[in-house]
Image (tube, coloured by chain):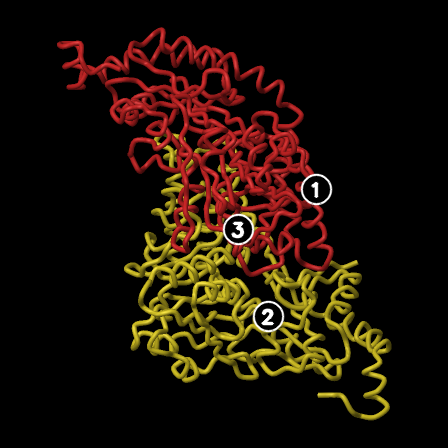
Chain colours: A yellow, B red
Amino acid sequence: MRKVYLDNAAATPLLPEVREAMLPYLGEVFGNPSSLHDWGDKAREAVESARIQVAQLIGANPEEIIFTGSGTESNNLAIKGLALAQPGKGKHIVVSAIEHFSVLHSVQTLGKWGFEMTLVPVDKYGVVDPQAVRKSLRKDTILVSMMHANGEVGSIEPLAEISKITKERNIPFHTDAVATAGTIPLDVSELGVDSLSLAGNQFYGPKGVGALWVRKGVRIMPFLEGGVQEGGRRAGTENVPAIVGLGKAAELARVNMPARMKQLIPLRDRLLTELPAKIDHVVVTGHLKQRLPGHASFCIEFIEGEAMLMLLNSQGVAVSSGSACTSRALKASHVLIAMGIPHALAQGSILFTLGLDNSARDIDYVLEVMPPIVDRLRQMSPLYAKFIKTGKGGK
Amino acid sequence: MRKVYLDNAAATPLLPEVREAMLPYLGEVFGNPSSLHDWGDKAREAVESARIQVAQLIGANPEEIIFTGSGTESNNLAIKGLALAQPGKGKHIVVSAIEHFSVLHSVQTLGKWGFEMTLVPVDKYGVVDPQAVRKSLRKDTILVSMMHANGEVGSIEPLAEISKITKERNIPFHTDAVATAGTIPLDVSELGVDSLSLAGNQFYGPKGVGALWVRKGVRIMPFLEGGVQEGGRRAGTENVPAIVGLGKAAELARVNMPARMKQLIPLRDRLLTELPAKIDHVVVTGHLKQRLPGHASFCIEFIEGEAMLMLLNSQGVAVSSGSACTSRALKASHVLIAMGIPHALAQGSILFTLGLDNSARDIDYVLEVMPPIVDRLRQMSPLYAKFIKTGKGGK
């Protein structure tokens, strides 16, 4: 059976060059970067080289990069660290309604200490209106957080326009760029943000490593405490092999980004156009053009996304029905609900995230195996039976 | 030149078997454990096998193990998570004066939200008196944290006696066992603790991974938020290769612990006895018997530890002058100060932590190169000149 992996938003395979770069640090170069001897020096030099590679990917200065253990940790550090570093300035935080839970839950937790959250709505494409951000700002707003692109629906947000507004008001602006860094061109100065999260496992780098970029001069409280690592901003022995891998993945992403996008976009566009042509009652979710290059997402009416996922898996195809971080929660996605998609339709969410290993034949295969699976699932759906009988219940 | 690595408390090399176990997860098995398809299943199975291996090392149930990114993260999660999970029960926390900064700074940060800390003193060997813990308890004490052994001076603490007291009072008892788990026999039931931190890079496992064990029924607030991983107790994509490596390292540590201790203890004891015999004005720090097997620490009068470290490095020998987590702070260790060692003497701290790659010849080499280095440093010391002249200033 053909094996087709279309879940690159959940995890990308390591590129062979990344693995090769990491291997010495799983072997002879095992020192602790904080140690003041040759073993430590070699490890520290490797970490500092990786810092330069990551900085170059996003147009930043190396000393502004804090290595973390994941994109989730970067977001926890950013939200809690930026909010708690501004005592006395106010307790109001503005975020979009479609942020990752590492942002939303962090803001909710700050609620215990008196912080208030305003959720900015999105349109039916999952895009934030900068003017809605402006309207949400208060005198006591001390932080705005908007993701660069949403990993569930692929829409890219107008950060450069939003940052004009936050700059006017001198409010720190964080972006969760886990879905975009290493995937599309990104420059922190052009975006106008003050901090940015990224994660290695989104662009063929290792798991267990991420980074937070914080613009020089912006104050942040440490989140993981207890050591002098990362300039005292993130304690814990550096994960040297993973940091080296992140650096190499960042370098490869920067150099090869145009070629990668050229490979992925036509495959994505085939899915976005041919799947709704082959299957009735399919809705594309997210923006059609302002969209991640390898990202095709849909809601398929009268089916459950998880059931679809299982049957596709039995045909050798890996997809997801939303964020891997919530995949076992089996609730309708807060992202789709915020976009105004009805609960019943949101249950039929399916998400294809393409990667460098995918070819046109993979798309052919998916387009071939999916229609009979959808048919089979709909045969079991009481809602579909009712729709066929009455013509009611479709969107 | 001979190369002698004696800084295993800062970082241990990966055992070849650990690296071999990890490699498939840096290659073909790259899925996200949260994904609901074959790629995810293989990753999840690997994580769950590692959970069993780690649990077996410490006599715990697998479902009580939370994988983290480091020992430091485990301690942050334990201190903040246990304290914040008991609202309304009190705000008093008792810790020893020689805890790692990941514990001490976490408690200090809780001070912002009204928590109070009592530091329990240690004796001149760095050992806590259980009766001093008893005396420090208040009606509103909601957490006690005492490390299992101190990584700077090697002393092992009487946790089983302390836990009798915390149990009487029904107060959660955390231990930072980063220095002991995988190094000496350890059973959470025998220790009587309620939570325990460990780290992979302390026993020939990978960097970037640790674990927190929390006894079933003990409530803890998540620290890293935003995903359903680790039962909702620690968000972020699991670092599968590192977790697999931690599991393998735990298994090897459990099986080979008696042989390892038999190798290390005689080497340690040679350092502890022969170094003070060869060099004047040398004091062993920590307890001579209740001591980590590969741990030999000293204060050498009339020298600076960092200068010693540099000169030993120039002879191919890696040591440290304290915790790697504070090595660039260049302050006298809070551990040595708490043991009553005067500041001037504490500056001459030096720490040998032996590992499985060390042999008797390494010890011969160190005992040969050290005396002339100490002589050379003392020739430059005004304090030593004064001591020679007046006989005053020695301890």
Residue drawn at the location 64% of the way across and 77% of the way down: A272
Is B343 left or right of A207, judged from the image as shown? left
Q: Which amino acid is tagged 2?
A: Glu
Whether residue A80 is visible to the viewer of this picture, yes or no, is yes
Q: Chain of mark 1?
A: B
> Which one is closest to the eye, mark 2 or mark 1?
1
**Residue situated furthest top in the rendering:** B277
Q: Which residue is mark 1?
A: B49
Image coordinates for residue B39, horizontal then vertical, percent: 70, 54
Task: Check if mark 3's residue and mark 2's residue have beta carbons within 8 Å.
Answer: no
Q: Nearer the viewer, residue A371 or B347?
A: B347
Q: Which amino acid is tagged 3?
A: Gly
> Which one is closest to the eye, mark 3 or mark 2?
3
Residue drawn at the location 62% of the way across and 23% of the way down: B257
Circles 1 and 3 on the same subunit: yes
Q: Quick check: A118 above or below B118?
A: below
Secondary-structure class at tag 2: loop
Where does the N terminus of chain A fall, quadrant-wise? bottom right
> Which one is closest to the eye, mark 1 or mark 3?
3
The numbered dot on residue A152 is 2
Q: Which amino acid is tagged 1?
A: Ser
Q: Chain of mark 2?
A: A
Quadrant position of residue A220: bottom left
Q: Quick check: A131 above or below B135?
A: below
Question: How many badges with numbers are in the image?
Answer: 3
Secondary-structure class at tag 1: helix
Quadrant position of residue A142: bottom left
Image coordinates for residue A14, horizontal then vertical, percent: 57, 51
Cα distance between the residues tagged 2 and 1: 30 Å
Q: Quick check: B169 above or below A355?
A: above
Q: Nearer the viewer, residue B202 or A3?
A: B202
Q: Which residue is mark 3?
A: B81
